[in-house]
Amino acid sequence: MKNCVRCDECRHKQRSADKKRSLQNRLKRVEGQVRGIQNMLDNDIYCIDILMQTQAAKKALEAFMRELLNDHINTCVAEGIRSGNEHIIDELTDVLYKLK
């Protein structure tokens, strides 16, 4: 069974339980950091401290994106190339340009 399914109406990606858990944990970390930033703002914490926490949340979200992109390249893109779907390369190029 293929990991990536793409049709005109929907897109799906089957992930292992371990991969899904890893990605979910990264997002939960980001979510917690953002809630922390909200609390800092509510409690009138010094601007620099809030900015530093915001930077940490940004880095955590970037780590999530890197892991997801790595998984995409190693599964969806590799599978697409093996099956002769060269459109997958254009899709990857477009998303990499947008992620700059």
Image (cartoon, rainbow, N blue to C red):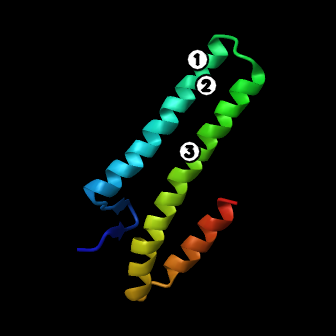
Residue wearing tag 2: 37
Numbered disc 3: secondary structure: helix
Numbered disc 2: secondary structure: helix
Q: Is residue 29 above or below residue 77?
A: above
3 or 2: tag closer to the N-terminus: 2
Give the residue displayed 71% in from the left and 25% down from the top: 49
Residue wearing tag 1: 39
Near mark 2 (Cα within 10 A), the count class, few <14, some 14-19 or many ≥20, is many
Q: Are marks 1 and 2 in contact (CB under 8 Å)?
A: yes
Return the residue nearer the eye: 27 or 2.
27
Return the residue nearer the eye: 75 or 47.
47
Disc assigned to residue 60: 3
Q: In the image, 93: left or right of 27?
A: right
Q: Is residue 33 above or below residue 5?
A: above
Query: Which amino acid type is marked by label 3?
Result: Ala
Between the residue at mark 3 and the residue at mark 1, the CA separation in whole angstroms equals: 18 Å
3 or 1: tag closer to the N-terminus: 1
Q: Is residue 14 above or below residue 81?
A: above
Numbered disc 1: secondary structure: helix
